[in-house]
Amino acid sequence: MKICLLCVGNKMPDWVLAGADEYKRRLKADVKLSMIVIPVAKRAKGVTIDVCLAREGSAMMAYLSKEDYVISLEVNGKSLDTLSLANRINHLKDDGRSIKFLIGGPDGLAAECQSRANESWSLSNLTLPHGLVRILFLEQLYRGFSVLKGHPYHRG
């Protein structure tokens, strides 16, 4: 199974990189995982948020093919519990398509990215920093695969 996490963001602190690396390492046996970071569009005087979102969206769309199954991670997306997430992963794994997960920048995802998404998931109703979203998502992905394999990591 191929999964790509497309994130809009800047350089992350070491603790974010370490946390993401830990879960990427744990996921190696289950998934071919890649992460692409798209730079945040420069916010400057006279540049509207819509222009910034459009720039970030265009950069993100360049990484998406027609065949990809796209899931946006947004506060207004569908809430999943751990078992639902594991079941969804299992279904998508059987589908055989490459899966791209999208995390927007400080102002969210561009409308074209939201429209392109086959699904939209929410990790929390809270507004979370982007670095933490990366770690939280990767941990939940690992937990989902653990559930599917009957691994004791998930005891909930």
Image (cartoon, grey):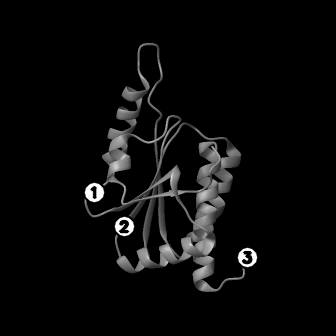
Disc 1, SS: loop
Give the image location of residue 93, x and y in percent: 43, 77
Distance Cα–Cα, label 2 vs label 1: 9 Å
Distance Cα–Cα, label 3 vs label 2: 29 Å
Disc 2, SS: loop
Give the image location of residue 114, x and y in percent: 38, 48
**Residue furthest to the left:** 66
Disc 3, SS: loop
Q: Residues within 10 Å of mark 1 (few under 14, many from 20)?
A: few
Sequence-first disc among 3 and 2: 2
| Residue under pointer 3 | 156
Tell me: residue 21, above or below residue 13: below
Sequence-first disc among 3 and 1: 1
Amino acid carrying mark 3 in the image: Gly
The circle on residue 53 is none
Sequence-first disc among 2 and 1: 1
141 vs 35, left or right, is right
Quadrant of the drawing holding the N terminus? bottom left
Q: Are marks 2 and 1 in contact (CB under 8 Å)?
A: yes
Amino acid carrying mark 2 in the image: Ser
| Residue drawn at 37 percent across, 45 percent down | 60
| Residue under pointer 1 | 65
| Residue drawn at 67 percent across, 41 percent down | 13
